[in-house]
Image: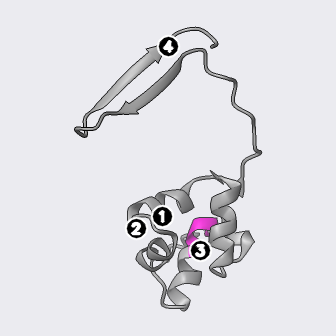
């Protein structure tokens, strides 16, 4: 009895891994170029979305945009209500002063 199995269509990440393998590149190579860990590089490329800045960095390494995650839109974060000032003392210890309110 013959069984026919249909293989799932490769997704973007699988195509990216194939593209890297064809060029003998690893996540470690990419990570060293970007100054991040290999695991961090892998996680960034597995995500559905990526920051526009990281997208530009990966594209500058020659990776086709069709193989990279889509960039998320730049949104402006709301201002925080609590301000935190960090002051470094002369002896090397850090003192954190937290001010409340919108000052």
- Seen in the picture, residue 88 relative to 29 is either above or below; the reply is above
| First-in-chain label (1 vs 4) | 1
Residue at 71 percent across and 77 percent down: it is 64
* Residue at the spot of label 3: 16
Instruction: Between label 1 and label 4, give the one nearer the viewer.
Output: 4
Residue 103 x %, y %? 63, 13
Residues rendered magenta in the picture: 10-16
Farthest residue, direction top: 101
| First-in-chain label (2 vs 4) | 2
* Residue at the spot of label 1: 41
Q: Quadrant of residue 14?
A: bottom right
Task: State if disc 3 and disc 2 touch (CB < 8 Å).
Answer: no
Farthest residue, direction left: 91
Q: Residues within 10 Å of mark 1 (few under 14, many from 20)?
A: many
Q: Residues within 10 Å of mark 4 (few under 14, many from 20)?
A: few
| First-in-chain label (3 vs 1) | 3
Report whether 63 appears left or right of 1. right
* Residue at the spot of label 4: 99
Task: State if disc 2 and disc 1 touch (CB < 8 Å).
Answer: yes
* Residue at the spot of label 2: 38
Compute the Cα span from label 1 to label 4.
37 Å
- Seen in the picture, residue 85 relative to 61 is either above or below; the reply is above
Residue 60 x %, y %? 67, 76
Viewer-proximal residue, 15 or 84?
Answer: 84
Can residue 57 be seen here? The reply is yes
Q: How many marks?
A: 4
Compute the Cα span from label 1 to label 2.
5 Å
Instruction: Between label 2 and label 4, give the one nearer the viewer.
Output: 4
Residue at 54 percent across and 70 percent down: it is 5
């Amino acid at each position: 009895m013959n069984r026919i199995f249909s293989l799932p269509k490769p997704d973007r990440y699988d195509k990216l891994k194939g593209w890297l393998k064809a060029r003998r590149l690893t996540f470690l190579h990419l990570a060293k170029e970007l100054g991040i860990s290999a695991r961090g590089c892998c996680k960034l490329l597995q995500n559905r979305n990526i920051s526009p800045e990281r997208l530009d960095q990966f594209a500058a390494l020659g990776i086709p945009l069709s193989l990279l995650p889509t960039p998320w839109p730049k949104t402006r974060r709301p201002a925080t209500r609590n301000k935190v000032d960090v002051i470094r003392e002369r002896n090397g210890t850090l003192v954190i002063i937290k001010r409340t309110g919108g000052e």
